[in-house]
Image (tube, rainbow, N blue to C red):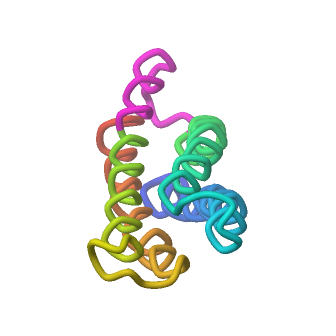
Amino acid sequence: MASGVFGQLIRFGIAGGITTGLYTLVYSPLAAFKITSEQVANICGYLVAMLSGYLLHSKWSFRGHGAEATKTSWRFFLVSLVSYGLNTAFVWLLTDDAMLAGPWWWPLIPILFVTPLVTFALNRIWVFG
């Protein structure tokens, strides 16, 4: 059972927790201290999370799942763009003046709980499947 979906989900959760933590470490100070806009902070966090996420997920979370590296790299990048799009939408909806204009930390809630579920499904089925 540890080598199947459940094992992958556990490894994905740990690796995803690390990459989400790295995203948060980059995004939070930039947005909280108004060093830059929330959207620029989101881009910076995304780049760090995408690079670390590819390494962790390809080498550990989905290791031996069957896909070759050349196929997974471009697919992983496309899924990371979906992740970036979701996170950008959350930041826009929850912090930008045109929408809810909430505090900088509001987007972290769906970024921590919605985006990982979507990216797990896409990575499991399409990237490393």
Q: With respect to residue 6, does 58 lie above or below?
A: above
Q: Residue at x 62, y 67 (%)?
A: 31
Q: Was residue 118 drawn as part of the magenta stretch in this picture?
A: no
Query: Horizontally, is 53 left or right of 66 in the view?
Result: right
Q: Position of residue 76 (x, y in %)?
A: 43, 34
Query: Horizontally, is 53 left or right of 114 in the view?
Result: right
Q: Which residues are magenta?
A: 63-78
Find the residue positioned furthest to the top.
70
**Picture quarter with the C terminus:** top left
The image quarter containing residue 123 is top left
Is 90 or 59 nearer to us in this picture? 90
Is 39 or 80 nearer to us in this picture? 39
Is 2 or 90 nearer to us in this picture? 90
Q: Residue at x 52, y 55 (%)?
A: 42
Q: Position of residue 113 (x, y in %)?
A: 44, 75
Is 5 or 104 nearer to us in this picture? 104
Q: With respect to residue 44, does 100 lie above or below?
A: below
Q: Position of residue 60 (x, y in %)?
A: 64, 43
